[in-house]
Image (tube, rainbow, N blue to C red):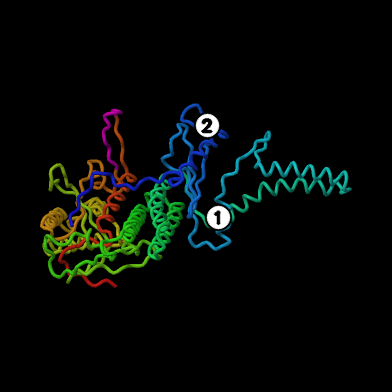
Amino acid sequence: MTTPTPPASGFPEPLRPFRQQPRRWNRAQARALRNGHICSSAGCPDGCEPVLIRERTGWGWIDWTVPADGNLPQEPDRIAVFSPLATRAQRLGLRWLARRPTPRIRLGPLDLRPGTAAVMVLALIAATLASLHGGVPLSIVLPAAALAPLLVEHLPDVLDARAGESVRILEAGPACRYLHRLAALHATLTDAAARSDQSQVRRALQIGHHQLFDTADLLQRRDTRSVSAVLIARERLMLQLVAQTAEILTPTADDEPSACPERSGRQPAGRTPPALCHQPSVEPSVPTSPMKEETDMPNHGSEQYTGGVYLLFAHEAYYPAHGQEINTSLVAAASLLHPRVRQPDGTRIHERLTRGRRRGEIVPLATLSHELDGGTLWPQVGDWAAVTADLLQLIHDRGCDALSLGLPPIARALVCSGPRSEVRAYDPTTEGYRVFGPADRIEVLVEIGKQLARTEAGRPLWPGDVPLPHPH
């Protein structure tokens, strides 16, 4: 199952404001242009605040900045995700929290809500009438008239703080951009649930909501660099949910899911392609949190694949077709145990590769070198050059499945560098150097994870004729 990288970038379609109701954005933008100051890159004071338009969703809300050029914003300014386990009272509070941001009225040195100003005027009128015609003493009227506006001004903040315990909010930045990508994938699940009432589709939507909330909660406490492996695994799971949900909703010729033929012994070179042999299921095959359920891996005759870690390694480029370059390959970690791979080096590298990893994690060979004291401890583990050469020959002979990639130079250099390394590239347009760091490396691994999820689509990569223990 050697699958080359498609020429397109492969990133999901970005989530745009009010994508199903574009007229709502046009109306909100026109209202903002009439009533607010739209910030531009030049000519705005330092204290200028952007005008935001809030889009409420079933799982939270998104605040979009109104660009000065009239185009749609590319990235949100803020994303909020509701707790999927909120009670009825908490859901009511979250609806209150998701209300449209209240405009402020400046009265001299005071910056008040419109409701506070209205209550202040009404309180003064009521206090005057009560004092003149009702005979109420000023010692009672004046404190009541002063407390009413204060109560209206501060009560929404108290309610917001109470409801904020069940919501996770991310401001603009790397964390918000990552959650924006997950929200785009979750929007696909939302559309699928709106078209179908199947329990599997609803379950996929629930899992996606849990993933959004757990990711937002994680990114509120940690930065993207320190939890890069978890983020990659979560995005792979969302991609698998989207792919499997689309497969469930796609009718087959006989309205029944196709069944994979049983395989025994060594697989011939022309075995059934995995794209024709999917098992539709919304249960994730790469669980990343306790709420997920592990699924049984497919039986390839004598070998049992326990799922888990993948090895990514670069090699000398080859060209299986005209104009198509393959310079990097990804295989299941169990392929290191294959008899045609140099042993015991492959077994030792497999033990080092899978130690302490999460299921579904993609580990570049450069990461192992980084963990082995910059590569100085490789002689104690094995000959990685001979092992990767055997793996590449095994891929050529179709003795195992692999995801074959034609990475661009910068992306290939990043995966060939350590997790904390930087790559400098000369930019002829600016006649300067651009630095690519750990965050860019994470983006490359996330993209590779997406392609792996589409390639597997319910059936993991076949590691070859490797006798593995049956998974628990």
Image spot of residue 291 (x, y percent): 41, 65
Q: Position of residue 34 (x, y in %)?
A: 56, 33
The residue indicated by pointer 2 is 46
The residue sitting at the front extreme is 254
Please give the range of residues in magenta.
422-431
Q: Does the magenta segment cover residue 436?
A: no
Residue 153, can we see it?
A: yes
Residue 242, located in which quarter of the rendered image?
A: bottom left
Q: Is residue 68 left or right of residue 413?
A: right
The quadrant in which the N terminus is found is bottom left
Task: Quote the CA–CA distance across marks 2 and 1.
Answer: 32 Å
Quarter of the image with the C terminus in it = bottom left
SS under mark 2:
loop
The answer to whether any part of residue 362 appears in the image is no
Near mark 1 (Cα within 10 A), the count class, few <14, some 14-19 or many ≥20, is many
Q: Which residue is mark 1?
A: 94
Look at the image and say whether residue 427 sits in the magenta stretch: yes
Question: Considering only vertical position in the picture, is 136 above or below 29?
Answer: below
